[in-house]
Image: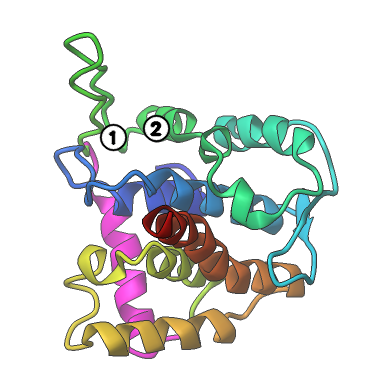
């Protein structure tokens, strides 16, 4: 793997097993990837988020970024300038899953097995080089045990918690932490991240935005 991975690429690996199948059968996987891509663009200082409870996005520097997934997301975000974060994380074009997969394939980290049986058998992304994900998991294990988080660590943990799959995805990395203790530790991590103001704000906002995007529609449909 050449150079550091995007936060979104690291999340892509965490959300899939080594055989290429999803770690969890959930429609909201793309929500997490969109949140990660948005955070990557905040880190790159291409976009920023407002101070609102559900922040609104502002494009700072339009145009290509230099990575296929981020470039695809920027095209979409330039049309969504001013929209709320909770609506943006549900946008599959911002998630750019296929572009993320293509980048990881080009780096030799995964293979891409195309759809079969007229699309009834979905694409799979079996791992070719397990080392990049192993390093990510080791970082997260250290942070959960009390280490200082990087912006990427805090973002990954916040997104996994927002999707409510942190206990499952981090089953080994959380050690003896129960679900409640894991949630509390991730809350601390999201406020302790050492980063610039814009990045720290993005990390803090992602958990709430994902909860809004994932669970409010469920509650609404259940009460209708």
Q: Which residue reaches farthest front?
A: 224
39 lies above or below 50: above
Tally the marks.
2
Name the foreground residue: 58 vs 11.
Answer: 58
By what rule are the colours in the image chosen? rainbow
Q: Is residue 5 visible?
A: no
Q: Are marks 2 and 1 in contact (CB under 8 Å)?
A: yes
In the rendered view of the protein, which quadrant contains the C terminus? bottom left
Q: Is residue 150 left or right of residue 165?
A: right
Q: Nearer the viewer, mark 2 or mark 1?
A: 2
Bounds of the magenta segment: 128-148
Say which mark, if any, is on residue 101: 2
Which secondary structure, mark 2?
helix
195 lies above or below 20: below
Q: Is residue 91 magenta?
A: no
- 10 Å crowding of disc 2: few (<14), some (14-19), many (20+): many
Name the foreground residue: 133 vs 162.
Answer: 162
Disc nearer the start of the sequence (2/1): 2
Q: Is residue 146 magenta?
A: yes
- 10 Å crowding of disc 1: few (<14), some (14-19), many (20+): many
Name the foreground residue: 200 vs 29.
Answer: 29
In the rendered view of the protein, which quadrant contains the N terminus? top left
At 28% from the left and 34% from the top, the residue drawn is 110
The residue wearing badge 1 is 110
Residue 71 rendering spot, x and y as whole percentages: 65, 32
Which secondary structure, mark 1?
loop
Say which mark, if any, is on residue 21: none
At 47% from the left and 84% from the top, the residue drawn is 187
Q: Is residue 146 left or right of residue 204?
A: left
At 45% from the left and 32% from the top, the residue drawn is 103
Tell me the chief SS of the magenta region: helix
Q: Which residue reaches farthest top?
A: 118
């Amino acid at each position: 793997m050449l150079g550091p991975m995007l936060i979104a690429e690291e999340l892509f690996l965490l959300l899939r097993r080594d055989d290429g199948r999803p770690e969890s059968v959930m429609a909201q996987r793309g929500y997490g990837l969109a949140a990660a891509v948005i955070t990557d663009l905040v880190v790159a200082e291409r976009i920023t988020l407002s101070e609102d409870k559900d922040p609104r996005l502002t494009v700072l520097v339009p145009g290509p970024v230099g990575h296929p997934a981020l470039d695809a997301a920027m095209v979409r975000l330039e049309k969504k300038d001013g929209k709320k974060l909770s609506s943006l994380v549900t946008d599959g074009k911002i998630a750019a899953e296929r572009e993320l997969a293509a980048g990881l394939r080009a780096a030799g980290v995964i293979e891409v097995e195309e759809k079969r049986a007229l699309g009834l058998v979905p694409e799979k992304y079996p791992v070719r080089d397990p080392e990049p994900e192993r390093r990510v998991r080791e970082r997260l294990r250290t942070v959960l045990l009390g280490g200082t988080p990087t912006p990427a660590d805090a973002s990954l943990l916040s997104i996994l918690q927002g999707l409510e799959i942190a206990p499952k995805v981090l089953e080994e990395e959380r050690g003896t932490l129960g679900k409640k203790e894991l949630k509390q530790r991730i809350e601390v991590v999201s406020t302790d991240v050492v980063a610039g103001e814009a990045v720290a704000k993005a990390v803090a906002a992602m958990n709430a935005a994902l909860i809004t995007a994932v669970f409010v529609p469920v509650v609404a449909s259940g009460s209708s």
